[in-house]
Amino acid sequence: MGRIVLPIALVGCVLALGSCGLADSRSPLPVPDFMRAKPAEPPPLEQPPDVRQMVREKLDQVFVAQSNPQNVQVSEPRHELRGLGWTACVKAELTSATGKPLGEEIYRISINGGVIIDRRRALPEDTCDIQTYQPI
């Protein structure tokens, strides 16, 4: 009889202690607030970057050197909806590799940690066409 009682008691203890990990802030179990896990604090937002200076110093990260960007202008940075970074729009008059004028092109840049991490042509959902621009 003693051989059966000890394993059953151990299993009961394991189940009871293991269920303590289930009592988080979203748990439907009736657990007192002091026993609930606290949700993690979101990391603080970084200061808005100086987009004008970044683009001026790293123009080759936004435009190909052969495109000879002229009349470069940038929008104010906007905080990304998903994530901690920033986005901004950059527009300039560009030329093709053969020297033919391409006209004005607009790019959306992504900034994280004070560094331009990505750039791509602006899409309508980027709303770059309604932004206010300043020359660099």
Image (cartoon, helix red, strand yellow):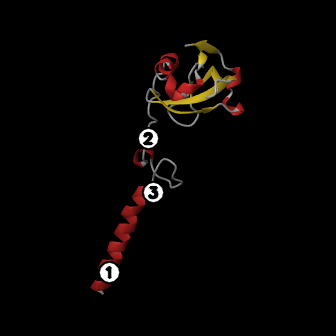
The one nearer the camera, 24 or 118, is 118
Residue contact at pointers 3 and 2, CB within 8 angstroms: no
- State the mark number for residue 5: 1
Image location (x, y in percent) of residue 84: 50, 33
Query: How far, Cα to Cα, is label 2 from label 1?
Result: 41 Å
Place residue 10 in its image quadrant: bottom left
In the drawing, what numbered circle is on residue 74?
none
2 or 1: mark nearer the eye: 2
Rendered residue at 36%/73% (across/down)? 11
Residue 27, percent across and down? 51, 52
Q: Residue at x 60, y 12 (%)?
A: 134
Instruction: Report which residue position mark 2 lands on.
Output: 40
| Residue under numbered circle 3 | 22
Mark 3 vs mark 2: give the one in front: 2
The numbered mark, 1 or 3, whose residue comes first in the sequence reads 1
Task: Judge whether 58 appears above or below 41 on screen.
Answer: above
Q: Amino acid at mark 2?
A: Ala
Examine the image and state in which quarter residue 90 appears.
top right
Check disc 1 and give the amino acid type. Val
Mark found first going from the N terminus, 2 or 1: 1
Mark 2 near mark 1, Cβ–Cβ under 8 Å?
A: no
Give SS at disc 3: helix
Total label count?
Answer: 3
Q: From the viewer's side, name the closer residue of 120 and 48.
A: 120
